[in-house]
Amino acid sequence: MQDVFIVGSGMTKFGVHADKMSADLGRDAALAAMKDAGADPKSLGAVFYANTAQGAIEGQHAIRGQHALRPIGIEGAPLFNVENACTGSAAALHLAFGQIAGGIVDVALVVGAEKLHSTDRARRLAVFSQPEDLAVVTAFVREHEARVADILPPPEVKIDEAMRSVFMDAYSVQARLHMKKYGTTWRQIAQASSKNHHHSTMNPLAQFTNDISVDEVLAARVISWPMTLPMCAPVSDGAAAVVLCSRKALDGFDAGRAVRVAASAAQGGSTRDVGDVRRAANYIAARRAYDQAGISPGDISVAEVHDASAYAELNQIEMIGLCEFGESGRLTEAGATSLGGRVPVNTSGGLQSKGHPIAATGLGQIHELVTQLRGEAGPRQVQRAAYAIASCGGGFYGVEEALSCVTILAAK
């Protein structure tokens, strides 16, 4: 395998872009990444474009990447459209990595773009109302709810039924299973949310940039206990992009700002018991990534993980080996995952605060880690960052993500 480098990275602000379509956001991110790399569209050997919701929300179901990128001169190179729910752009990055590592192309562009806000309510909700998705998630909740029937909220807690989501119900069940097995507390889960909201105050590209204390997180509207509103990722618009190249092509770019892709691993979910964590796709993908990079979890300086809920962050840092199973709540409460701690997690603000524009999320994580490894993160900079890990999951099928992607980056 050939070495692979990220030589350009760009990202729009995540949030509400009422005046832009999905393709507009994809173009903005692609142009930013190409400018950052100093890349010429004619140098691209392949392009990968990730999007999930454009068909449901904007009515454009096919060749979305071509429609987005041809107007800015990105043409000729083969363009592959990728759909894999929340892990769309992480999967696209994995595919591009394989093309370069395998010697098929020397330079590739990867883009993830999503427009989720719409004035048409039916269109806005369409991507979250797909019947087979709802059936799978509802079946999971029904099957496992009885296991946690004795893990009850404090008597004063009132569920906001108007905000209820079956997807957050699934996170609720998983969180309560963790609470029951390991003694994880509601306050520890809230600490992950408060921490990420604080990190986002230092990220101008984040959707939310306001501090929220642990007590404020706990006092917020309850979506599905123990998940309160600040613990849940918002609906977001946004895009992110990267330019990758081989070592042979590196001389054509600013090698001093290049970040090496030390590993890229992807694993599909499987039929298993929810408690059989060592068969989890995320766990397997992370071990393969560490083996590929030739490092261990103890070498990681900073991490971006898929915290679509505050509990999801606790689950993910266990899965990728930043702590033992059952230790994530205590680790978070002790400040080890905060800036200045042993291994800062979600310095961008995470999905809960930076935002979660589904197919753009994976590359949003990568953009943050590239910024960290370049030493360009400003007040949220992790000092002497050497290795960074991104963990992104897409969809839900059975008891876990349908696909899990883990990427390890190294400072050059």
Image (tube, rainbow, N blue to C red):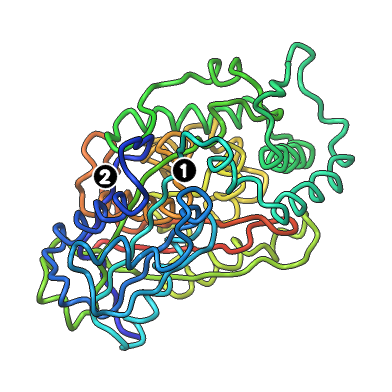
Which is in the foreground here, disc 1 or disc 2? 1
Among numbered discs 1 and 2, the one appearing first in the sequence: 1
Quadrant housing residue 341: top left
Q: Residue at x 76, y 54 (%)?
A: 136
Q: Is residue 246 above or below residue 384?
A: below
Question: In the rendered structure, which amino acid carries the disc numbered 1?
Answer: Leu
- Determine the secondary structure under disc 1: loop
- State the residue in front, 348 or 128: 128
Q: Residue at x 63, y 58 (%)?
A: 401
- Local packing at callout 1 (Cα closer than 10 Å; few below 14, some 14-19, many 20+) is many
Furthest residue to the bottom? 103
In the image: residue 258, left or right of residue 202: left
Quadrant housing residue 287: bottom right
| Quadrant of the rendering where the C terminus is positioned | bottom left
- Local packing at callout 2 (Cα closer than 10 Å; few below 14, some 14-19, many 20+) is some
Q: Residue at x 30, y 60 (%)?
A: 68
Alpha-carbon distance for marks 1 and 2?
35 Å
- Reading the image, the residue beneath label 2 is 383
| Quadrant of the rendering where the N terminus is positioned | bottom left
Q: Is residue 261 above or below residue 114?
A: below
Q: Residue at x 56, y 34 (%)?
A: 232
Q: Is residue 279 above or below residue 55?
A: below
Residue 94 in the image: x percent, y percent? 43, 71
Residues at badges 1 and 2 in contact (C-beta under 8 Å)? no
Residue 347 in the image: x percent, y percent? 37, 40
- Reading the image, the residue beneath label 1 is 116
- State the residue in front, 363 or 321: 363
